Image (cartoon, grey):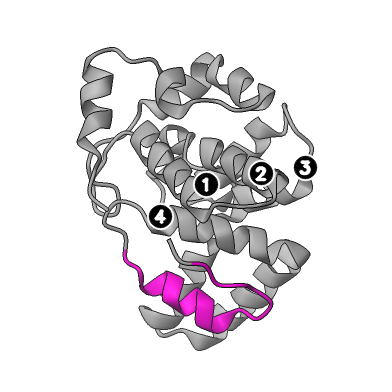
């Protein structure tokens, strides 16, 4: 799961974002025409979990993982691609200067609000907003050892995601199996959540 060198070369050679992400539906095309969205795609430097640096490279890796799922349901594929397109595309707008951080300024919240201009699918919008939540719950339980807080957060999460847990899980797999991310949260997810059908990529 190292950074694909061809993406860095493509960007240096001025390959367009459209050529890299290969939009498959009208919403993806519209998103790639937005200046503020494109700005977010080009943001980022190599860091732990994201050695690929720029957001667009991470999105490309997630989209490649969606392809590896070889889904028979094209609607599920469409939803996963839309979530992938925008889930991290507003990290450049997230306010990280305050501690604790304002949850309303999380990049997932910003992504939801932005994407709601173009779609009204509650499953996509919910997963966009909460796409990092499973990781935060895992961290509370396994790093900070705060069982009470993790259980409270888990209950809230399950209420919010509801019947879309499989879709959330599929995205969590595609997102976690990138860069040099810690795979322990994914293993924890598969052991903790009932009602999911595990996949391998």
* Magenta residues, start to end: 182-199
- Ranked by sequence position, the earlier of labels 4 and 3 is 4
- Ranked by sequence position, the earlier of labels 1 and 2 is 2
Q: Is residue 132 visible?
A: no
Q: Which residue is mark 2?
A: 79
Mark sitting on residue 106: 1
Q: Which residue is mark 4?
A: 99
Mark sitting on residue 175: none
Q: Is residue 115 above or below residue 29?
A: below
What count of labels does the image hold? 4
- Ranked by sequence position, the earlier of labels 2 and 3 is 2
Question: Judging from the image, what secondary structure is the residue with disc 3 in?
Answer: loop
Question: Judging from the image, what secondary structure is the residue with disc 4 in?
Answer: loop
Q: Residue at x 41, y 33 (%)?
A: 92
Q: Is residue 10 visible?
A: yes
- Ranked by sequence position, the earlier of labels 3 and 1 is 1
Residue 120's x, y, as percent? 79, 37
Q: Nearer the viewer, mark 1 or mark 2?
A: 2
């Amino acid at each position: 799961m190292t950074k694909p060198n061809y993406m860095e070369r493509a960007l240096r050679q001025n390959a367009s974002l459209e050529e890299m992400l290969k939009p498959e539906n009208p919403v993806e095309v519209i998103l790639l025409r937005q200046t503020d969205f494109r700005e977010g795609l080009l943001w980022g430097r190599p860091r732990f979990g994201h050695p690929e640096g720029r957001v667009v490279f991470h999105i490309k890796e997630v989209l490649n993982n969606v392809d590896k799922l070889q889904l028979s349901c094209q609607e599920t594929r469409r939803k996963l691609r839309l979530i992938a397109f925008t889930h991290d595309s507003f990290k450049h707008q997230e306010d990280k200067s305050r501690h604790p951080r304002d949850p309303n300024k999380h990049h997932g919240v910003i992504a939801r609000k932005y994407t709601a201009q173009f779609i009204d699918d509650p499953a996509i919008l919910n997963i966009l907003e909460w796409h990092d939540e499973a990781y935060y719950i895992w961290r509370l339980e396994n790093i900070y050892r705060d069982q009470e807080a993790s259980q409270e957060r888990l209950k809230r999460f399950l209420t919010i995601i509801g019947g879309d847990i499989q879709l959330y899980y599929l995205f969590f797999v595609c997102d976690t199996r990138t860069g040099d991310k810690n795979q322990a949260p994914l293993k924890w997810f598969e052991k903790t959540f009932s009602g999911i059908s595990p996949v391998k990529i």
